[in-house]
Amino acid sequence: MNPDFPTMDDDVLAATMAALAAAGLAPDWPTPSDRAALAGSTGWTGRHLDEAVRRAFAPYTSAACRRLVALARRAAWADRASLGNPGSPTPASANRGLLAILAGRVPAVASGALFQGLAARHAVVLKPSSAEPVFARLLCDLVARTAPFLAPAVTLLDAPPGDPRLVFAVAAAPAVLAYGSDATVAAIQADRPDGLTLVGGHRESIAILFRDALDSPASAQRLARALARDASIYDQSGCLSPQVVLIEDGGRVSPADFTRLLHEAFVETARSLPPGPIPFLDAAAIRMFLEESRLLARASGGLVLPASGPVPPVVVLLPDLPARPAPGYRVLQVVPFRGSPDLASLLPTLANRLQGIAVAGDRRRLAATLLRAPAFRPCRICTPGRLQSPPAGWPENGVSGVRALAM
């Protein structure tokens, strides 16, 4: 792993982290050539790329960085106290190192791993995502330019699966943060039976709209715009991207009317957050999902928008049918319910896989719903439009990474 983490007090560490985030938010970063490389790697251009980069650093304000460092300090103290050794913790040591195995295209995944590792005083090795290898490299370069004394403790391991360097690093790292498919994270866990391993397997997010939130066309339109933005940023490739909207029937705005508003908002949002290109196999999956949805809509009195022509964005309403696994890339399902939503029936493939719920309406009803269906308790609950803006150090996958790494 990397060299020891450099010695510095909490205030200096927090200030260094905040300065790093500020440098990432500067208008001259990345450079034009690096920006072109990042656009080619993510598939996002223009304002969509700008927004993706901004969200990678925006949570790490000065106050947030101080809070993360203090959280790590408290966790280290608590851990030592539980072992009967309440003396001053010494978090910087040779056996503290984090290997972050990244996946997907979302820059915030890489920055989140880095900032959590730094707050817990881990030397950090970033293993780039095979889907998007550029941002992790740019992040290491940014550390070298902004905080050169930290540069030896923040490095890149650009090795493909099965590479002996990666195999050794997985086995030897004091801590691993692994993202990827369920099979990938399970294999990493199996290779580390006794090591600290934090995993981020397959998870999705949804929205629940209770009818008191749909008391007028104007409020419904605001919700549609908020959800369209949540689903458009990153083209639904993140675990906080909503895939399904559960909507209570019987309100002033019907599920069909809301579906139309949502599609209009989707089309409008594409102007400010242009979609990236869709790989051939994913385009084929979208076409198959769309054709199946249109057949089901004709049989169930549902609605698929657009009815024809270029896709996506796509919004599908199929009354009396549960949500199905969907291809992403701005394909959103609207699923009506009456009374108390039965999440197991409405979301049959998402038990123990909900990362976030955006809720509009009476939150007491959501609490009661989750009490009846604990397998659907999410890691994040927020209002529509805020799903993709989690705070620094939020309990991703149900775990406080900073706390776990500091102990």
Image (spheres, rainbow, N blue to C red):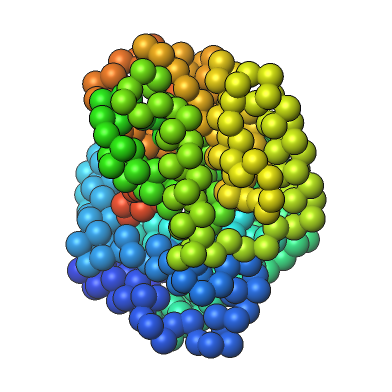
Residue 355 place in picture, x, y as percent: 46, 37
Residue drawn at 48 percent across, 30 percent down: 256
Asked if residue 92 shows in the view, the reply is no
Residue 45 place in picture, x, y as percent: 56, 72
As drawn, 147 above or below 246: below
Residue drawn at 55 percent across, 80 percent down: 35
Q: Nearer the viewer, residue 352 or 154?
A: 352
Residue 55 place in picture, x, y as percent: 40, 63
Residue drawn at 51 percent across, 26 percent down: 335
Q: Nearer the viewer, residue 103 or 336?
A: 336
Q: Is residue 326 left or right of residue 227?
A: right
Residue drawn at 60 percent across, 74 percent down: 39
Residue 203 place in picture, x, y as percent: 54, 37
How many marks can you see?
A: 0
Q: Nearer the viewer, residue 299 or 31?
A: 299
Asked if residue 18 shows in the view, the reply is yes
